[in-house]
Image: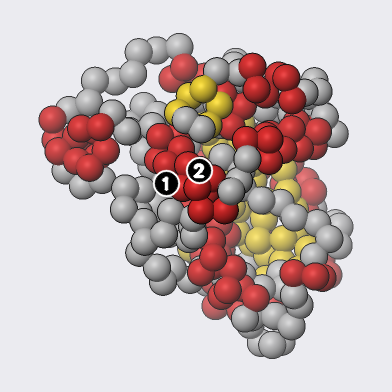
């Protein structure tokens, strides 16, 4: 499978801003810091950047979920682009990566900035915006709001409860996800919480939505991460050895939604994983390092 599109792209550099619960830097400052780090890592200048993509793009809803859009960055860096893209209806955060790979592979761009910036601290400290009648009676929220199920944790709690029932999963097993996450955080100098967590810490934390507890939840932070997806034939000019892509997968076959999934214990990642493994001769047994999204 040497002619796969992802084989014609590489990650040439990566960068990350500071991460904290309450940073004084503005979202655009965080973003530019992360991008500067990524460009330095790759040995590229902003003049060599001809593409940019982010997930999910502009969201002026006050949530902090997408604090900076790609045009903010384009204007701040005075970029001359041949390709750009941002869209919510894609394979989530990795959709931006897949779009960058496609653009580079197709020859629309040579060096694409991929970034994501969130800024949750101001949201924590301000009252939740009053929902409008339109927002609560149309689309997804028309099924969630009547049951006060707007927060994702409530939907995930139903999935967890079903997993407990179907597979006999125990709270002690669920706790290991949070405990292991904290162990890994201790190795990351930029992590917000690095002190050890014990079983007692986990089980004395309050229930948020049965069976999920406080330490099963996301931690709102301010941060930005960026990296550069470059054409593979540009790798000879890079400062460091690039990271190559072996296989990607984006399939979505089963009915999947927040309020009525086809199977509560079979998330969308199953289809995506099957698509990915079909594009490589490797198997899960060959993997010795995993970075899994854990909300």
Vertical order, 248 against 92 (above or below):
below
Task: Between residue 69 and residue 252, name the one nearer to us.
Answer: 252
Q: Mark number for residue 49?
A: none
Vertical order, 77 against 146 (above or below):
below
Badge 1 density bin: few <14, some 14–19, many ≥20, Cα 10 Å = many
Residue at (65%, 76%) from the top-left corner? 277
Give the labeled residue for mark 2: 160
Badge 2 density bin: few <14, some 14–19, many ≥20, Cα 10 Å = many
Quadrant into which the C terminus falls: top right
Give the labeled residue for mark 1: 57
Residue at (80%, 56%) from the top-left corner? 289
Earlier-in-chain disc, 2 versus 1:
1
The x and y percentages for residue 253 are: 41, 71
CB under 8 Å between discs 2 and 1: no
Q: How is the image coloured?
A: secondary structure
- Decide if residue 39 is in sight here: no
């Amino acid at each position: 499978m040497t002619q796969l599109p992802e084989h014609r792209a590489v990650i040439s550099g990566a960068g990350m801003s500071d991460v904290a619960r309450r940073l004084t830097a503005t979202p655009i400052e965080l973003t530019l810091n992360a991008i500067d780090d990524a460009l330095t890592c790759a040995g590229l200048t902003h003049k060599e950047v001809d593409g940019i993509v982010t997930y999910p793009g502009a969201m002026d809803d006050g949530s902090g979920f997408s604090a900076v859009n790609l045009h903010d960055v384009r204007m701040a860096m005075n970029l001359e682009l041949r390709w750009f893209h941002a869209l919510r209806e894609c394979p989530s955060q990795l959709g931006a990566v897949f779009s960058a790979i496609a653009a580079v592979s197709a020859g629309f761009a040579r060096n694409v900035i991929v970034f994501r910036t969130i800024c949750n601290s101001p949201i924590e400290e301000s009252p939740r915006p009053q929902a409008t009648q339109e927002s609560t009676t149309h689309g997804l929220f028309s099924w969630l709001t009547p049951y006060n199920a707007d927060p994702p944790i409530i939907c995930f709690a139903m999935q967890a409860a079903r997993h407990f029932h179907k597979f006999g999963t125990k709270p002690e097993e669920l706790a290991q996800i949070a405990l292991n996450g904290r162990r890994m955080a201790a190795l990351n100098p930029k992590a917000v919480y690095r002190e050890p967590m014990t079983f007692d810490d986990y089980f004395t934390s309050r229930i948020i939505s049965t069976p999920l507890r406080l330490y099963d939840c996301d931690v709102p932070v301010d941060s930005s991460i960026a990296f550069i997806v470059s054409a593979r034939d540009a790798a000879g000019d890079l400062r460091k050895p690039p990271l190559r892509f072996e296989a990607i997968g984006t399939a979505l076959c089963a009915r999947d939604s927040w309020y009525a999934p086809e199977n509560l214990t079979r998330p969308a990642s199953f289809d995506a994983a099957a698509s990915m493994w079909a594009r490589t001769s490797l198997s899960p047994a060959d993997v010795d390092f995993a970075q899994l999204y854990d909300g």
